[in-house]
Amino acid sequence: MTLFESLGIDGSYLVLALLVINVALIAIVIVLFTRQRKMKYNLSVFMNGKDAESLEDAMVEKFTEINEINRLGKASAKEIKEINDKHKFAFQKYSIVKYDAFKEMGGKLSFSVCMLTDNNDGFVLTSMHSTSEGCYVYIKEIIAGEAYVLLSEEEKKVLNEAKTRHSVTEVEL
């Protein structure tokens, strides 16, 4: 102890510091030991009844399943795109207006129906009911939201209502 005393270090402090370091190292060893045992247990559960060949077969099977899922996903995406492309030509926007076409009629038996695609292409169908002259039905083509024949006030109203409706949006991939 004379060496430590010549340096001005009390030996009891040194022994106490080494004791604290030993306790900390023992705690670290215990933690590492428990982690190692846990990993060993997990490995034994994972490898239970399997050798390297059967483990390889299991991995190949899982990769095959993943490839099949990817193939089906791509096929589904292609089908959805085809449906969206066809959907653009389906009637998506509509409107109907009922009215009395003639003064002697009541009950709003006349009507105009407008059916439009997403691009505002379609038709206006009008049925005018009369007690004395029967029923008249007219259809007028609509291209890009415009009619190239004269429209009645009711037909203009039904066309404008249909154009302002929102079409069904496409499914995004």
Image (spheres, grey):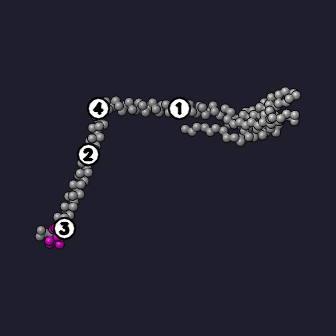
Counting residues from the start of the chain, the first of labels 3 and 4 encountered is: 3
Quadrant for residue 54, please give it: top left
Q: Mark 3 is on which residue type?
A: Tyr
Regarding mark 4 in the picture, which secondary structure is present there?
loop
Q: Please tell me whether residue 82 is drawn above or below residue 39 in the rendered image.
A: above
- Contact between labelled residues 1 and 4, with CB atoms less than 8 Å apart: no
Report the residue marked by disc 1. Answer: 76
Identify the residue at image location x=58%, y=37%.
171
Q: Is residue 149 left or right of residue 13?
A: right
10 Å crowding of disc 3: few (<14), some (14-19), many (20+): few
Counting residues from the start of the chain, the first of labels 2 and 3 encountered is: 3
* Residue 152 located within the stretch drawn in magenta: no
Report the residue marked by disc 2. Answer: 36
Quadrant for residue 19, please give it: bottom left
- For marks 1 and 2, give the one nearer the viewer: 2
Report the residue marked by disc 3. Answer: 13
